[in-house]
Amino acid sequence: MVTHPFHPLHGQRVDVLRVCRYGAGRRYVCDGGVFGRLTLPEDATDRGSEPSQRLLSFEVLVEAVALVAVLRAEQESQR
């Protein structure tokens, strides 16, 4: 099943024709019906890992920047 939220076939099942290794992951060559053959990375399918529970937002990025600042300060104090 295509799980990528912006893919035109989102939520639809497609037939997997071939599985290919690509770097550390896999890609699936699929029959996309009217779209013809298409290649999907594993994380765009239900065979990939679960999507993150938190969406990447401005607030999440601010929290990440704050965390990096704290970690850098701790690293500097240990020198």
Image: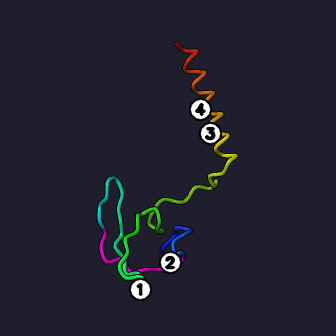
Residue 35 screen position, x and y as percent: 42, 82
Amino acid type, residue under disc 4 in the picture:
Val
Circle 1: residue type: Gly
Q: Which residue is mark 2?
A: 9
Query: Is residue 60 positioned above or below 18 on the image?
Result: above
**Mark 3 lies on residue:** 64
State yes or no: discs 1 and 3 in contact (Cβ < 8 Å): no
Residue 75 location (% of width, % of height): 55, 21
Q: Which residue corresponds to mark 4?
A: 68
Judged from the image, the secondary structure of the residue bearing numbered disc 2 is loop
Residue at left offset 40%, top offset 68%: 40
Instruction: Determine if the magenta segment contains residue 14.
Output: yes
Q: Amino acid at mark 2?
A: Leu
SS of the residue under disc 4: helix
Which badge, 2 or 4, is on the more N-terminal residue? Answer: 2
Cβ atoms at labels 2 and 1 below 8 Å apart: yes
Read off the magenta span.
11-19
Q: Measure how far apart labels 4 and 3 are at the Cα level.
A: 6 Å
